[in-house]
Image (cartoon, grey):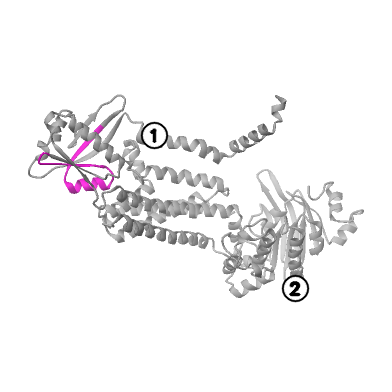
Amino acid sequence: MNYIVEVQGVKKSFKDVQAVKTLNLSIKPGEFVGLLGPNGAGKTTLVEMIEGLQQPDEGVIKIAGKTWKSNTTELHNLIGLSLQETKFMDRLTVFENTQLFASFYHLGTERVNEVIELVELQDKKKAYVTNLSGGQRQRLALGIALLNKPSILLLDEPTTGLDPHARRGIWTILKNLKDEKKTSLILTTHYMDEAEFLCDRIIIMDQGSVLADDTLENLLQNYDGAHNLDELFINLTGRHLYE
Amino acid sequence: MKKLYNNQLYRLIVAHMKEIVREPAVLFWGIGFPIMMAWGLGIAFTNKTEMSREIAVIEHKGTGSFQKSVLEDILEHYPGKQKGDYILPLQNEKVGNINLTFHACSLSDAHILLKKGIISMIIDVVDNKIYYYFDPANAEAQLLYQLVKGVVYNGPAYYSSHQEEIKPLTVSGTRYIDFLIPGLLAMGIMMSSSWGISYTLIERRSKKLLRRMVATPMKKSNLLIALITARFGMNVIEAVLLYLFAWWYFDIQIQGNPFALIVIFIAGNIAFAGISVLISSHTSNPEIGNGLINAIVTPMMVVSGIFFSYQHFPDWALPVIRNLPLTMLADGVRSIFNEGAGMMNIWKETLILTATGLITFLLGLRIFKWY
C-alpha cells in the first residue's frame, strides 16, 4: 500500500531527554489521525520531524515516498501546517498576511480570497491580525495552512485555549476537508472530543512511545472497561490525559 | 516575625523584588549599564589628571605676527612647546589642571580643525585687537573663551589693554549644528538598522513566525534580503527628511561630493545590516535581544563622536574609537558635509564598512537559528 507519511524507527533526544523513542507509523492518503498524549509525550517533536523542522537522530521519515533531504521544496509544497500559537504579522491585515504566504507558493489573489472565505474571515479581511480574537487567529492559521491545498495537513493543538464555539468553527472546516478526501490530517490535541469527532484513527503517545494505535471503536473494545479516551488513557498509564 | 512573613504588603514587595532580581536584562540595564556609562563618560570627561583643550591661533603669513603677538608673550611665561604647538598649562588643585594647546595655523586649516570637532575656538590677533571666533551656541566654546580671556587679562598689564571682539561663527560647516547633523544621520542608520532588522528578526523568531515561514517553499535568503531592503528604503527616507529639515531650518550644506555621500551611506547601511543580522542570529528572547542591541549601539552612540568630539577620550582609547563602524561612518559623512571631501577621502572608510557588513552578515548567516 502507498502511504503518504511513513515513520520508520525514528528516535529523537534533546540533551538527556529522549523525546521520541523508536517510533514507527504510517498514514494513508485521506486519513485523519489524532495524536493524543499529555504534555511532554513527544507529539510536537514527532510532528515537527514530519514537518521537516527537526531532524531525527535515527530512523527515516518519508512524505509521499520521499525524504526531506534533497526534496525540501517539493515536500514543502505538499504539506500545510499550523504550529502551536504561531503569531502572524500584527500590523498586516488578514488579507495581507494570507497574500504574503500565498506568494511563497506562487499563488494569486483568487486563492487568497478562496481561503479567507473557507475559514470564514471575509468580514475580517481588512482587519489587522492584532485585532483578531483567539478563534479568528486560529482560523487564519488554518487558512494559511490550507493555501497550497496540501496533501498532508499537520495541526499542532489548533483549538487549545479556544472557547467551545470557536473550537466548533475549526472542527466544521476540518470536517468539510475530510469529506473531500483529498487531504490527510495529523492532529495533536489534548481534547478527547476533538479526536473523537475528527479522526479515523487515534494514536496515544506517552514519554516518547506509542501506547496504542487504532480506530476509536477498536481501542475502546480492546481495553476493557474504557468508555471513552480519557478512561482508556488512565487504563494505559494510570494518569489523566490532561496531567 | 511570623505576622510580617505573611503580611500582604511584605509578600507583594518580596514578589516584586524577586521578579526584578530574576530578570537578567533588568539587572543589566538597571545596574550594569549605568556603571558602564559612568565609566565610559567618566574617562572621557573626568578621570584625567590633566584635561586638554585645543585652540587655533591664526598665523598670518609674511608678517610673523604670531611670533610677535600678544599670545606669544603670554605663552613665553609658560614654556611648553611641542611639535609647533604652544602648551599653556593652567594649574589649579581644586578645579584640576587644564592644558590649553594653541595650534598655530592658517585660517583654512583652523576651519578644518573646527569642522572635525578637534578645536572649538579660533583666535586671531590683528592690530592689537584679539578676535575670538566660536559658536555661541556651543557651551564648551563659551567656557574656553572665558578661560582664555582670563589668561589674557591676567597676563602682563599691557595685554589686558588689548581690545577684544567675539566673532560668532555662523559660517556653514563650523557651527555645532554642522557637527551634529552628519553624526545624527550616521546614528540614524545604526539605530534604524539594529532595531528594524535585529529586533524584528528576534521578535519573529520568538513568535514562531520564522519557523512558520521556513516550513513553506520560501527562500530563506529572500526573507533577509527583503528585511534589509525594506530597512534601507526607510533609512533613505529618514536621511533625506533629516537633511531637508537641516537644510531648511539650519542652512546645512553638503560641501563635498554628493556621490561620495551616497557611497558611504550605502556602505554604512551594509555595515549595520550585517551587524544586525549577527546580533539577531541566535536569541529568541526579545528581552535578551533588547539588551544585546543596546549593548552594541549605546556605547557607540556615546563614544563615536555623534554629540561631542571623541577627542576628549584618552589617547589609548582613540585608535579603538576611530575604528568603530559608527565613528567611521560619522567621520566620513561629516567630512563630506563640512570639509568638502570626495571619494578619495572616504574610500578607506567605505571599504572597511562594506567589509564589516559582509563579514558579519556571513558570520550571522552561518550561525543563524531559524527556529
Label 2, label 1: how many angstroms apart (C-alpha)?
72 Å
Question: Where does the image place residue A124, in percent across and percent down from the top left?
Answer: 64, 67
Q: Element type at marker 2?
A: helix
How many marks the image carries: the answer is: 2
Q: State the residue in front, A160 or A229.
A: A160
Residue named by callout 1: B42
Q: Three-letter amino acid code at disc 1? A: Gly
Residue B370 in percent (x, y) is at 57, 55
Q: As displayed, is residue A126 above or below residue B160?
A: below
Residues at circles 2 and 1 in contact by the CB criterion of under 8 Å = no
Label 1 secondary element? helix
Crowd class of label 2 (few under 14; some 14 to 19; many from 20; radius 10 Å): few
Residue B369 visible = no
| Corner quadrant of residue A227 | bottom right
Q: Is B106 covered by the magenta stretch?
A: yes
Mark 2 vs mark 1: tell me if same chain. Answer: no
Mark 2 or mark 1, which is nearer to you? 1
Range shown magenta: B99-128
Q: Position of residue B128 (x, y in %)?
A: 11, 39
Q: Which amino acid lies under the numbered mark 2 shown in the image of this protein?
A: Glu
Pointer 1 chain? B
Q: Nearer the viewer, residue B283 or A26?
A: B283
**Considering depth in this image, is B237 or A178 the residue closer to the camera?**
B237
Q: Residue B120's image quarter? A: top left
Residue B300 counted in the magenta span: no
Left/right placement of residue B24 relative to residue A6 reads left
Circle number at residue A180? 2
In the rendered image, the residue lying farthest to the bottom is A110
- Residue B82 in the figure: left or right of residue A83: left
